[in-house]
């Protein structure tokens, strides 16, 4: 079981790192940053959430710092985006949204799995999974002097939290790590895509 959980965690983490690396690099190009700025933003978007999670659960040094594969994956995604930006730019907005939802789901699953492996209480594990999913995007938006999307976007952090809860419930009823990860990731992904498509939002007060 430990081997299975570790394998799921690594695959989800690296896949999410690659997808969010592309997103960070794309945001850097649209923000008119140079190559160094692009690399920094890709790295931060891809790995900041995991770094915060690891620091909070006491997994130091953070996996993305200790394991060279994470940085290599983020920088590879950044360079691919830099050299093939015209192809990325041609992607339909819906496709980019789907890729973002995939990255969110992968990180929500990875963050929750790792917190549970460190015997963090399930309630806090769900919150840590959410932080893993949205942390990098929050740092990205701050670097670009924007209000973080997680604070104003249609269902986003909520989707990550829902996926984390589904994963925890699946583990509690005896599902394998792999099955629980697919269930949680699928729930996060579907909720995010449906919310973005139908423009669902949480309630808010509109000031005058």
Image (cartoon, grey):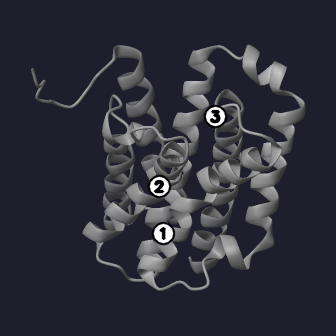
Q: CA distance from mark 3 to mark 2?
A: 15 Å
Circles 3 and 2: CB atoms closer than 8 Å? no
Question: How far across and how far down the image is residue 164, in percent?
Answer: 37, 55
Question: How far across and how far down the image is residue 5, in percent?
Answer: 57, 70
Q: Report the front residue among 126 and 143.
A: 143
The residue tagged with tag 2: helix, strand or loop?
A: helix
Q: Quadrant of residue 205?
A: top left
Q: Which mark is residue 27?
A: 3
Q: On the image, numbered disc 1 is attached to which residue?
A: 52
Label located before the other in sequence (3 or 2) = 3
The quadrant of the rendering that contains the N terminus is: bottom right
The residue tagged with tag 1: helix, strand or loop?
A: helix
Q: Give the number of the mark in front: 3 or 2.
A: 3
Q: Is residue 141 above or below residue 115?
A: above
Label located before the other in sequence (1 or 2) = 1
Q: CA distance from mark 1 to mark 2?
A: 8 Å
Residue at 34% across / 15% down in the picture?
198
The reply, left or right, for residue 54 in relation to residue 47 is: left
Q: On the image, numbered disc 2 is attached to which residue?
A: 135
Residue at 32% across / 33% down in the picture?
152
Label located before the other in sequence (1 or 3) = 3
Q: Give the number of the mark in front: 1 or 3.
A: 3
Residue at 80% across / 53% down in the picture?
75
Label 3, residues with CA under 10 Å away: few <14, some 14-19, many ≥20: some
From this viewpoint, which residue is outermost toward the right? Answer: 83
The quadrant of the rendering that contains the C terminus is: top left
Circles 1 and 2: CB atoms closer than 8 Å? yes
Q: Is residue 70 above or below residue 155?
A: below
The residue tagged with tag 3: helix, strand or loop?
A: helix
């Amino acid at each position: 079981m430990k081997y299975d959980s570790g394998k799921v965690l690594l695959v989800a983490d690296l896949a999410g790192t690659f997808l969010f690396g592309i997103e960070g690099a794309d945001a850097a190009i649209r923000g008119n940053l140079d190559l160094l700025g692009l690399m920094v933003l890709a790295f931060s978007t891809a790995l900041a959430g995991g770094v915060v999670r690891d620091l909070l659960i006491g997994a130091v040094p953070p996996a993305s710092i200790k394991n060279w594969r994470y940085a290599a994956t983020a920088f590879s995604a950044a360079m691919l985006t830099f050299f093939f930006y015209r192809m990325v730019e041609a992607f339909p907005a819906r496709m980019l949204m789907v890729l973002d939802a995939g990255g969110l789901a992968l990180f929500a699953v990875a963050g929750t799995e790792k917190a549970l492996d460190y015997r963090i209480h399930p309630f806090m594990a769900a919150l840590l999974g959410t932080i893993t999913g949205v942390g990098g995007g929050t740092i990205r938006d701050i670097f670009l002097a924007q209000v973080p999307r997680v604070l104003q976007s249609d269902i986003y952090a909520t989707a990550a939290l829902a996926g984390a809860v589904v994963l925890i419930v699946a583990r509690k009823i005896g599902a394998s790590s792999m099955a629980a990860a697919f269930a949680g990731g699928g729930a996060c992904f579907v909720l995010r895509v449906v919310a973005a498509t139908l423009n669902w939002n949480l309630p808010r007060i509109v000031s005058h």
